[in-house]
Amino acid sequence: TTTEIMRWLGFSVGDGHLAKTHVSLYNRNPEYVKRYVKGGEDLWGIKSHLNPDHGSMYTFSSVRLARTLEALGLSGNAPKKTIPSWIYTTPRDQQVAFLLGYMDADGHIGKDHIVLASRSKLLIEGLKALVDRLGLRSGQLYSQWAQREWWPGYITSGTTWKLNVALNKRTQEILGIEVRDKLQYDFGSGKAKGLDHQYFGYDTITEISSGLVAPVYDL
């Protein structure tokens, strides 16, 4: 894996849908999701297509890609998504990239903290484990009832699980981000310019294979 792959995978866990024959990415901001759509096309060498009836949803019609993500443990619908254990064994910069990708999908900045959200409690528990491994200060999980309109006529409601991560100088240094003000910032919608972290390009993946196994120490 690379930081580029991990960033894309983090986003797809937050704003992606995996089926047997395809993978879809959706975000309410069409210009924003296009960045990850273009990144996915470059990474996997697969063209996507827009689903006009489903807002800004783009689909990669590829059984190969769907099976690859499933083999990586990234399957499951929204309430059942999890963080695969292998994520914790990747190099530190790749773990950070995965977290940033997820933040791009389902994160926003509050007054003095970053909020990570998901319909899956298991996923938020996995993100808390990742946040703790990176040395970031976080609180306890909590839940809220929420209703969301994905596109005209399609509304979902239910319990959303959340995790607050302290937004301090250490967090900004570890994640490589710069918060220029304390305005609320929705990573997905880009409603405010409160966060600045670099976006990067991708090289196409030609093969995924097992690598050497090395001991990992959690000090």
Image (cartoon, rainbow, N blue to C red):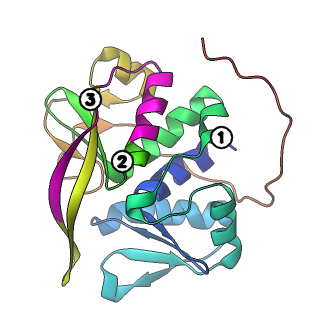
Asked where in the image residue 176 lies, by quadrant, the reply is top left
For mark 3, does the 10 Å Cα neighbourhood hold few (<14), some (14 to 19), or many (20 or more) residues?
A: some
Q: Amino acid at mark 2?
A: Lys
212 in relation to 121, above or below: above
Kindly identify which numbered label has been placed on residue 86: 1
Locate the C terminus and report the quarter of the image it occupies: top right
Residue at which label 2 appears: 121
Number of the front mark, 2 or 3 = 2
Q: Which mark is residue 179?
A: 3
Magenta stretch: give its range: 125-147
Q: Position of residue 153 (x, y in %)?
A: 18, 84
Q: Earlier in the sequence, mark 1 or mark 2?
A: 1
How many residues crowd around disc 2 within 10 Å: few (fewer than 14), some, or many (20 or more)? many
Question: Which callout, 3 or 1, points to the residue nearer the camera?
Answer: 1
Q: Amino acid at mark 3?
A: Val
Q: Does the stretch in magenta take in 145?
A: yes
Determine the residue located farthest toward the right in the rendered image: 212
Q: CA distance from mark 1 to mark 2?
A: 19 Å
Q: Which of the two discs, 1 and 2, sits closer to the camera?
A: 2
On the image, the x and y values in percent for residue 156 come to 22, 71
